[in-house]
Amino acid sequence: MVAKRLIPCLDVKDGRVVKGVNFVGLRDSGDPVELASKYNQMGADELVFLDITASHENRGLIYDIASRVADQVFIPFTVGGGIRSTSDFHKILNSGADKVSINTSAVNTPELIKEAAEKFGSQCVVVAIDPKCVEIRPDGSKRWEVFIHGGRTPTGLDAIEWAVRVQEFGAGEILLTSMDRDGTQSGFDLELTKAVSLAVSIPVIASGGAGSPKDCLEAVTVGGADAALIASIVHDGDYSIQDIKQVMREGGVCVR
């Protein structure tokens, strides 16, 4: 049985970890390298670092943070934000990251997914998808639209269809963040997570809404995700990594 993963996410702005609600109202949550080291010691399976305003502000990558994190942690970590070319992939991987996450550039230049997968391997390419529910149809089904630039720009893309396309382009993993649930601690969008998980065969990381260990359990059982991304509930000290993993074990989930 493949173990499900628990992955703390560190949203970085101006060199600090921040957290907001629905992609706005950011508050400081600490130093990224210190938090990375703490979560490594606490038993996190992986880490994700997202420079959340890099694409919007047209800034460069967080190479320095990646390099410093690589010196401190011994678990895989992903870095995203502002990646626009395979050269950027090369730089961030050389800084010590194991995977690179792209969102805005994946939508604007889908060929980048294929080029990066061919050059570095699909296992290094994570496509982040930030959907928002924009329609509830008469039959009760929903349509989720993909947003880019840190949730600022609608694309017209259907989230499920886009997930299938990024897999076809060669992505090795999808980081799926519900904009409706982000930072709310009201639970993951299980309907969205399940829809994407059923549509693709590559791993899906559920993100947006974790408020309790039970939410993480439901993300990988009801939602069918391969991993649960967490932020506020560990940044604020509400739960430890092991607290969450214990509940997942008790729910019959294989975790490390």
Image (tube, rainbow, N blue to C red):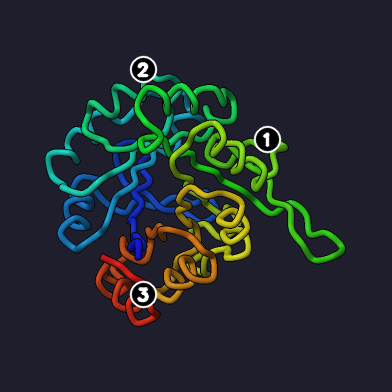
Residue 248 bears which disc, if any? 3
Residue visible at 30% across and 49% down in the picture? 47
Could you say where residue 132 lies in the image, as x and y percent from the top left?
65, 51
- Looking at the rendered structure, the secondary structure element under dot 3 is helix
Which sits in the foreground, 244 or 197? Answer: 197
Tag nearer the camera, 1 or 3 = 3
* Quadrant hosting residue 107: top right
Distance (Cα) linking label 1 and label 2: 25 Å
Amino acid at circle 3 = Met
Could you say where residue 234 lies in the image, as x and y percent from the top left?
31, 64
- Looking at the rendered structure, the secondary structure element under dot 2 is helix
Asked if residue 143 lies left or right of residue 200, the reply is right
Asked if residue 161 lies left or right of residue 185, the reply is right
Could you say where residue 110 lies in the image, as x and y percent from the top left?
57, 26
Tag 2 residue: 87
Amino acid at circle 2 = Ser
Tag 1 residue: 155
Distance (Cα) linking label 3 and label 2: 39 Å
Label 3 neighbourhood size at 10 Å, few (<14), some (14-19), many (20+)?
A: many
Query: How many numbered circles are shown?
Result: 3
Above or below — where is 228 with respect to 130? below
Residue farthest toward the front in the current orientation of the protein = 1
Amino acid at circle 1 = Thr
Closer to the N terminus: mark 3 or mark 2? 2
Residue visible at 33% across and 56% down in the picture? 8
